Structures are given as C-alpha cells and as structure tokens.
C-alpha cells in the first residue's frame, strides 16, 4: 500500500477506501470556501459523479475544467472568481497534475469571499504530491 494510502487509512480508518460517501450529503455539509476533493485510483475518473449531481440538481452555472497545462490556470481562476461571486459550481479535473498551483488555491478561494451557492470540486488520483493543506480542508 503506498504511503499516502497508509496515511489516509491511519487518519480516516479503513472504511475510507471501502465506503463511498453520498456526494449530495457532502455538499450540504461543506462551506463555499472549502474545496471538495474526490480522490480515486489511477485510471478512474470521479468527475462523472459531480457531472451527474449537477445535472440532477439542475445547477445552471456549472463549469468543468480539465487541468494539465499552465494555460488552464487563468481559465480556472476566472471561473472560480466569477462563480464565487454569482453562484455555481466549478469542477477542476485531475488536480494531481498541478501540485504547485494547488498550494495557493485555498487562499485564492478564501479571498473570493464566495456566496453560499458556490461549490468547488477537485478530482485527483491518490497522490502523495497533493498538498496536506488541501487534504485537511
């Protein structure tokens, strides 16, 4: 078992890997300034869960963004700024590809003073490169 999985097992218990949380419950318990991180094993993409929930709840302002290049940083920050102000959901896919950029994401989201209708979702492969501040938030 990789070190990151061992860490999560120690912190959250073995059910962390076997019990799937209901995403609709998670969004009710999460503040607009706290990103919702969905981790999965390599090769599995958890973004479909967010897509399906956004469609089911008829979220009008929903912006999925695939990370993976420096050009996407500006697009992601503009989407977060806009929807944090007006309300809506942003989904940043594959954030494990941008661990350095993630270091400033928490502060950036807080600085936007998001409205209650804002949610920020992040999908990632399980990776030890994810900032610990993101995992704790």
Image (tube, rainbow, N blue to C red):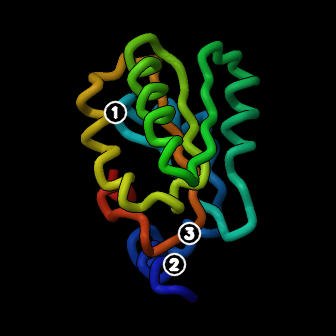
Q: Are marks 2 and 1 in contact (CB under 8 Å)?
A: no
Along the line of sight, the residue nearer the viewer: 113 or 72: 72
| Of 28 and 72, the residue lying toward us | 72
Location of residue 56 in the rendering, given as x and y in whole percent from the top left corner: 75, 23
Distance (Cα) linking label 1 and label 3: 22 Å
Identified at 36% across, 60% down, the residue is: 100
Residue 65 location (% of width, % of height): 60, 38
Q: Secondary structure at mark 1?
A: loop
Residue 31 in sight in this render:
yes
Q: Is residue 43 above or below residue 103?
A: below
Q: Given contact means CB atoms under 8 Å apart, are the residues at marks 2 and 3 in contact?
A: yes
x and y percentages locating residue 46 in the rendered image: 69, 51
Query: Could you tell me which quadrant the N terminus lies in?
Result: bottom right
- Sequence-wise, the earlier of marks 2 and 1 is 2
Spot occupied by residue 107 in the image (x, y as percentages of width and height): 25, 41
Direction bottom: furthest residue? 1
Residues packed near mark 1 inside 10 Å, few (<14), some (14 to 19) or many (20 plus): many
Q: In the image, which disc is placed on residue 126?
A: 3
Q: How far apart in space, not on screen, are marks 2 and 3 (Cα)?
A: 8 Å
Q: Residues within 10 Å of mark 3 (few under 14, many from 20)?
A: some
For marks 1 and 3, the one nearer the N-term is 1
Q: Secondary structure at mark 3?
A: loop
Q: Residue at x 46, y 58 (%)?
A: 98
Toward the viewer: 90 or 56?
A: 90
**Residue hosting label 2:** 5
Write the residue at 37% across / 53% down: 101
Looking at the image, which residue is at 61% across and 34% down?
24
Q: Which residue is mark 1?
A: 33
Q: Where on the picture, by quarter, is residue 103?
A: bottom left
Helix, strand or loop at mark 2: helix
Mark 2 or 3: in front is 3
């Amino acid at each position: 078992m990789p070190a990151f999985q061992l860490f999560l097992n120690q912190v959250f218990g073995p059910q962390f890997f076997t019990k799937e949380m209901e995403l609709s419950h998670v969004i009710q318990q999460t503040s607009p300034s706290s990103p919702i991180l969905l981790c999965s094993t390599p090769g599995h993409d958890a973004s479909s869960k967010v897509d399906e929930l956004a469609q089911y709840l008829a979220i009008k302002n929903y912006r999925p963004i695939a990370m993976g290049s420096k050009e996407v940083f500006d697009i992601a920050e503009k989407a977060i700024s806009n929807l944090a102000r007006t309300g809506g959901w942003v989904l940043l896919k594959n954030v494990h590809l941008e661990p350095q950029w993630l270091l400033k994401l928490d502060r950036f989201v807080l600085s936007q003073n998001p409205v209650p209708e804002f949610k920020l979702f992040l999908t990632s492969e399980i990776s030890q490169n994810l900032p610990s501040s993101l995992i704790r938030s």
